[in-house]
Amino acid sequence: MLTKEKAANIFDRIRRFSSADEVEAIFTGSRFALTRFANNAIHQNVEEENSIVSIRTNFAGRTARATANQFDDESLRRAVAVSENLARVQAPDPDLLPMPTADEANSGDKLADKSVRATRFFDETAAITPADRAEVVKSIVSVAGKHKLTTAGIYSTSESREGIFNSRGLANWHHQTLAEISITMLAEDSSGWQKLNSPDVRNLNPARLAETAAQKAVDSAHPREIAPGKYTVILEPAAVLDIVGFMFWDYSGVAILDQRSFLNDRIGAKLFGENINICDDAEHPLQAGSPFDGEGMRRQRVQLVENGVVKRVVYARATAQKMKNSEYAGKVGPIEPTGHGFPLPNEMGEMPLNIVFGGPENPRSVEEMIASTERGVLVTRLWYIREVDPYEKIVTGMTRDGTFLVENGKIQCGLRNFRFNQSLISMLSNVEAMSAPVRASGEESFDMVVPAMKVKKFNFTEATKF
Amino acid sequence: MKTAAHRALDAASVRGVTYADARVVSIRNRSLTVKNGRVGHASESESLGIGVRVMAGGAWGFAASADLSRASVEAAAARAVEIAQASARVKREDVRLAPEPAAVAEWTTPYKLDPFATSVEQNLDLLLKVDAEMRAVAGVTLAETGMNFQREESWFLSSEGARIHQTKYSTGAGYTAYAFAGSEIQKRSYPNSFGGQWQNRGYEQIEEMKLVENARRVAEEAVALHHAAQCPEGTATIILDGSQLGLQIHESIGHPIELDRVLGMEANFAGTSFLTLEKLGNLRYASDLVNVVADARQEHGPGLGTFAYDDEGVAAQSTPIITNGRFTGYLSSRETAHTIGAARSGGTLRAEGWNRLPMIRMTNVSILPGEKPMSLEQLIAATDDGIYMETNKSWSIDDKRYNFQFGCEIAWEIKNGKRVRMLKNPSYSGITTEFWNSMDAICSRDEWTLWGTPNCGKGQPQQVVGTGHGASPARFRNIRVGSAYQGS
Ligand SMILES: [Zn+2]
């Protein structure tokens, strides 16, 4: 497995092989294992170990990248030569900046005593074996058996390392673990689902996740079909995360400069309800991932939305400089590098990837939301979400694995799944209640810290056959 | 390379496995983009490693490593066995593999021009020309172009004696013009959206696509959409262009016929399928005019699903999926063939790379063209009242593959056999079998293109592979249109 020392040694060799003005190397390495089960048995069970070096060279405004996963001299020489060849033939880009020094990259680190920074590496997670995973799957299968259900899902554990070095002295390194469990329980005509991940495997309770998924399958049996239309919905955190995730690509300086963002001409406006507060915060205790961006810049905490008003977007270094000189400079709120850039060169610029929703003044549990609902739909998760309209931010998708009719404060029965076509702007203007935010994981968007939400006038346009 | 695979098989066999295979794969990729007159990114990557798949105790184990040293390869094989033994702790029945003759073969994608032999300058020069054409049109606010090549060389060795050396090339390119004005963002893409057109060919593919020649028209359409009428809501006759029909096939035929989905193996992620086993040979999937095959053979064309052998050593085949409207075949593997009473795998197992377990993937799932000569213009001329839609913009379908909704970039209203006006934000939706049963016309071979979908995701960990979909424009009656904007 790659260590910071080994990576530093590889980077020294890369520098020797390069004639470029500047060189950068991004290292990623992981040991990833995943046990997959279906029909109450393990059917796929995999493990991989891989390390990658991605080399970027700069020649006076021209830059390019070459990636390899072999570290012998010949492979490294070839990757350096490929990167240099890709860079040299380009016309110079006046917006390309010199690589950041270590001081510049780390100046955003507000934590005075680095030793108190919470670790995201847990030996307990790294030590999990195939036999350990099989035992957990066995316990999930036994919950399925108890309820006469069929289960399918995954239990994965991984250990990963990420580092960035450049020829101006930057050398940042991050390592972490992650454990993840996702469980589907299937009955004759219904299903239930739960998913959770954490750097610390001890935060996962497989039996409880299995029981909750099983209960949803049992409770939604023999689903009724009701007419599509506008309903009050209670979205569990995974459903919230998967749908709202589709707007965060647009909280980017480049998206504004390219005029492809739904925030074009809307920053500073009250776009959402008073109760919506959103920040990006890589250091949040419920977040995971590396504390630096694709250029090695420390990720800053950025308040994106305050009381429904979109305050600002995030910036890579070059984007901030470009925005300051653009016609939009006075209209987009604070402009500064925030540590959200993708590895260069890229056309997307940056985006916030550590989203944390602010908690409401009066948090309501999902149970309380149900109890306060005269007629509505409880949604476990959403599926196959795609953008229909980029400026009104209308997205379409389906409900899945546990959709329920709520009447007179109680769950009445399971429902056939719906298709929705819903504007995220109007959805976040119609939030009547929220739970305390939790770490949530889905399949359509990246992991976030989000609350469950009760939303009025959610737009279901069709029902499917199950 | 071959030595590493041999060593892995030897190390597995001394540990008492009942079956083992090893794939050494070397992948090289070049990716170039241009945005608004400047290089967006220029990058290349190489990835090399070995994946070892073993069966022990009637269950599967898989381990992969980028390190091809003797010690590492032997450790990966031992790890795969340990993992298989763990799998066997939670099994219902032993895995059964359909027999397959052990092939010894060499194969390379036929190509005229090795894309990696073309210069980066030449590649970027073409993209910059396209970019300039698009940005010459007033109202274009963003122009994006891209080009991608891949070469994948693999050595597949199995404990049954298979020895297969394959090299596949794929090439893709395309572009999109965006126009933001007022409170609307519109876009147009060519030859297709989400990365353009892709095939398993060399650089000749790029040269034949007429990229520069179409750029100005496409950009003008993106701007013109701002002045077009909104696609109405209601029921209509629709005609879909071949690229959109290709995606329709992918989502509402290609995925539901994957036998692993049908058997519940994807239930936690990609989903299951409405095509339960008793429907084989019995279900009227589509109207009589519909004939669909899953064909991985080179004679079908240079699709992203074309190869000589799949990733468990089964030779490429053509399977009739829908025959005169009736459902006649699934995509299968050696492990799943017995569930449909097949004596042999359909040869559809593929992996994203050396580090991934091969699984059932679409090959080239294509609708056969109409036999009666008919061009798109003739089909439009034969339509009294309808909407012609082109180029996918959004796509979504439920986890059993019944209810779908697609949005397209552009449409034209048809009245009395003529395109009368442009429509913006077109969309249509329906239920899979109802939709396919409503097809009443399809264009002939001249209009048929083997489209490529480079971004099909499936599996945990997720694997992205390319699939092929031959299609020509076709007409459908009584389809629900405009639902994507309903109530918003
Ligand atoms: Zn797909």
Image (tube, helix red, strand yellow):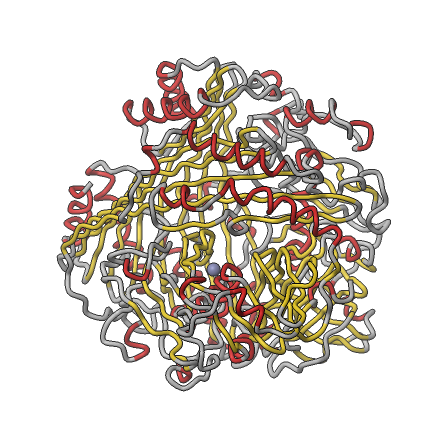
- Please report the residue visible at 44 percent of the width from the left and 32 percent of the height from the top: B43
- State whether residue A88 is above or below residue A181: above
Which residue is painted at 76% across and 44% down in the image?
Answer: B181
Q: Quadrant of residue B91?
A: bottom left
Q: Position of residue A285 (x, y in %)?
A: 64, 41
| Image coords of residue B117 (percent x, y) | 32, 33
Tell me what residue is drawn at x 23 percent, y 42 percent.
B73
Residue A269 picture quarter:
top right
Q: Is residue A167 above or below residue B409?
A: above
Q: Quadrant of the N terminus of chain B?
A: top left
**Residue B143: horizontal and vertical position, in percent?**
61, 38
Seen in the image, is A238 located left or right of residue A67? right
Q: Quadrant of the C terminus of chain B?
A: bottom right
| Front one among A162 and B384 | B384
Question: In front: A357, or A203?
Answer: A357
A327 or A340, nearer to the observer: A327
| x and y percentages locating residue B441 in the rendered image | 50, 75
In this view of the protein, which residue sits in the foreground, B174 or B362? B174
As drawn, is A184 to the left or to the right of B418?
left
**A127 w.r.t. A29: above or below:** below
Location of residue A270 (image quadrant): top right
Residue at (41, 49) in percent of width and height? A128
Numbered circles on residues, count: 0
